[in-house]
């Protein structure tokens, strides 16, 4: 499956013209999500998840969209099967129905929801950083876990960042 993020004219029929163009290259549309309406310039940003039959090259999707007047492809990537808004909502529902397990659920569901290969929760509250939770595909951190925590502090930016300076262990609190 593939994800196309498009800027299209925000007027009736525009999405239909794009769908027809994708159909002409044998694309099977699985989902369409309207990401943003840009009323100031009369455009919309839409995500379209499509699949192609074997033997059809993915670049045909971009060519089909570029062939539609006033349509611009701003993102094109492979898209993990099974994702989408329903996965996001399912994860939120699971976390809100079991608040005590929300962190575990978040780590477990993150790869599917965020279309990532793995997820991990690092614990930097003690004297050394360690992996608190991880998915089965999480790579071995070894001695590198400490380099990830805390992200902002590792770049020396916490003093200028009100959010980071309020984190435990920074010695500062924002007012």
Image (cartoon, rainbow, N blue to C red):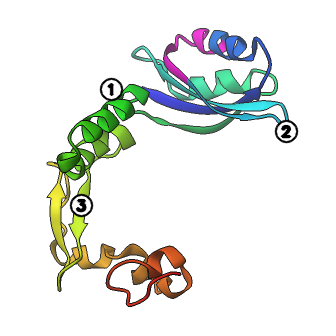
Q: Along the horizontal axis of the image, is 80 left or right of 69?
A: left
Check disc 2 and report the residue beneath it: 40
Q: In this view of the protein, which residue sits in the foreground, 94 or 154?
A: 94
Q: Along the horizontal axis of the image, is 20 left or right of 27?
A: right
Q: Label 3, label 2: how many angstroms apart (C-alpha)? A: 41 Å
Q: Secondary structure at mark 3?
A: strand
Check disc 1 and report the residue beneath it: 82
Residue 14 at x, y percent in the picture: 75, 17
Furthest residue in direction bottom, as rendered: 171
Q: Which residue is found at the position 32% from the left and 73% from the top?
A: 148
Residue 41, quarter of picture? top right
User: Residue 158: which numbered mark, if any?
Assistant: none
Check whether the beta carbons of the residues at disc 3 and disc 2 lie within 8 A of each other: no
Please tell me whether residue 22 belongs to the stretch shown in magenta. yes
Q: Earlier in the sequence, mark 3 or mark 2?
A: 2
Residue 11 at x, y percent in the picture: 80, 19
Q: Earlier in the sequence, mark 1 or mark 2?
A: 2
Assess disc 3: are there few (<14), some (14-19) or many (≥20) residues with their C-alpha within 10 Å of its C-alpha.
some
Q: Which residue is found at the position 58% from the left and 24% from the top?
A: 61
Q: Secondary structure at mark 1?
A: loop
Residue 56 at x, y percent in the picture: 48, 18
Q: Which residue is found at the position 39% from the left and 82% from the top?
A: 154
Please tell me whether residue 63 belongs to the stretch shown in magenta. no
Does 161 appear above or below 34? below
Assess disc 1: are there few (<14), some (14-19) or many (≥20) residues with their C-alpha within 10 Å of its C-alpha.
few
Check disc 3 and report the residue beneath it: 121
Residue 172 at x, y percent in the picture: 43, 88
Residue 155, quarter of picture? bottom left
Which residues lie in the magenta part? 21-32
Q: In this view of the protein, which residue sits in the foreground, 54 or 70?
A: 70
């Amino acid at each position: 499956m593939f994800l196309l993020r498009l800027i299209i004219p925000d007027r009736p029929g525009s999405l239909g013209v794009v769908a027809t163009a994708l159909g002409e290259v044998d694309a099977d549309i699985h989902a369409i999500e309207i990401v943003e309406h840009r009323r100031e310039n009369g455009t919309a940003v839409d995500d379209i998840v499509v699949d192609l039959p074997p033997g059809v090259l993915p670049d045909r999707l971009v060519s089909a969209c570029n062939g539609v007047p006033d349509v611009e492809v701003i993102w094109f990537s492979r898209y993990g099967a099974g994702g989408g808004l329903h996965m996001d909502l399912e994860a939120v529902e699971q976390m809100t129905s079991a608040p005590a397990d929300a962190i575990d659920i978040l780590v477990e569901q993150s790869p599917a929801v965020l279309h990532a290969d793995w997820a991990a929760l690092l614990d930097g509250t003690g004297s050394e950083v360690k992996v608190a939770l991880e998915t089965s595909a999480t790579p071995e951190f070894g001695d590198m876990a400490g380099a990830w925590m805390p992200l902002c502090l590792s770049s020396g930016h916490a003093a200028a960042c009100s959010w980071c300076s309020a984190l435990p262990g920074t010695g500062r609190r924002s007012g």
